[in-house]
Image (cartoon, grey):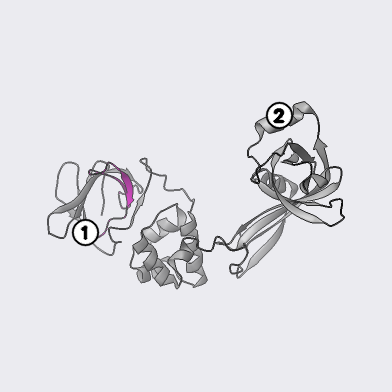
Amino acid sequence: MRAHLGDQLVIEGPATGVARRDGEIVGLHHEDGTPPYDVRWSDTDEVTLVFPGPDAHVRPLRHGPVATVHGSRPPADEMVTASRAARPSGTNNPGDIGRRVAVERRRRGLSREETAGLARMSPDYLAYLEVRPADPTVATLIRLADALGTTVAALRGGGLDRPSGQGHALLHPELRDLDPEECRTLLSTHGVGRVSVSPSDGRPAVVPVNYDVVDGAIVFRTAPDSVAAAAAGREVAFEVDHVDDALSQGWSVLAVGPARAVTDPDAVRALTRNAHTRPWAGGERQMWVSIRPTSLTGRRITPAGL
């Protein structure tokens, strides 16, 4: 099946020759004009990404003969809402559902073609789902879950409330050290970390805080009588990490250095004015603490060979 921009995509109804839905093809994803297409539907003016099924036909812009789709294609419900502009074919930014599908497929040693056959869908659609953000229908998820021996809830991330790290370990994991520059990059993109402190009662504690990185220093605000405030005036450890249960990989960064209370009024006002987030715990938290790392170390777990 091939189409050009401006051609009409027609979805037939149960009665032969009766159009159930039609729309203008406004975006192509392959230079040769093969599916999928971005289609602006005439009844809603909405643009969706369409993988045509066997009930679909292309009516050329000049109203030539109708071309019928042959071969195995996904049902008409395999349409994913997309932006009005066609996405570049090189984009590789999978959504959470697509990542979970890909992980479950690999764990069971299935190819895309095998999985698509079991789920009664197009391999092209499965490939799209695994590498780009998508919103498949419930019917599609049911077929995928059945093919992969899992549940729709699991593919949707129903276990997100569980503690991180309960997924399957990688078959061939690789643990590598991160250099200081990588550590600084990861540290600067995060928003919640854990600071290790020793309050006046002598009992060590680790508390989560919302933080920013300003001029190389880790800064967070807290209440003067809080556990986190005990970090000021001491050398402390500050840790931040990310665990990806869907892919069974992650990283962690540990910063060690002296902490101090920020007392200069101008510096306090600047930190408050430019803060990216407010403390999730709420309440009055006017004390700013700054940690200047003297040591930055980190580690990352990935599949071997990446």
* Disc 2 target residue: 270
Which residue occupies 70% across, 39% down? 284
Local packing at callout 1 (Cα closer than 10 Å; few below 14, some 14-19, many 20+) is many
- Secondary structure predominantly adopted by residues drawn in magenta: loop
Residue 9 in view here:
no
Report, in whole angstroms, how far the alpha carbon at label 1 lies from the one at label 2. 62 Å
Which of the two discs, 1 and 2, labels the residue nearer the N terminus?
1
Residue 229 appears in which quarter of the rendering? top right
Which residue occupies 21% across, 50% down? 21
- Image location (x, y in percent) of residue 130: 45, 58
In the foreground, 299 or 264:
264
Q: Of tags 1 and 2, which is closer to the observer?
A: 2
Report the side of 233 relative to 302 (left or right). right
Residue 85 appears in which quarter of the rendering? top left
Q: Is residue 180 magenta?
A: no
Report the side of 45 relative to 91 (left or right). left
Q: Quadrant of the C terminus?
A: bottom right
Q: Quadrant of the N terminus?
A: bottom left
Local packing at callout 2 (Cα closer than 10 Å; few below 14, some 14-19, many 20+) is few
* Disc 1 target residue: 55
Which residue occupies 45% across, 48% down? 90
Q: Amino acid at mark 2?
A: Ala
In the foreground, 21 or 74:
21
Report the side of 138 relative to 179 (left or right). left
- Image location (x, y in percent) of residue 112: 42, 66
Q: Which residues are magenta?
A: 32-54
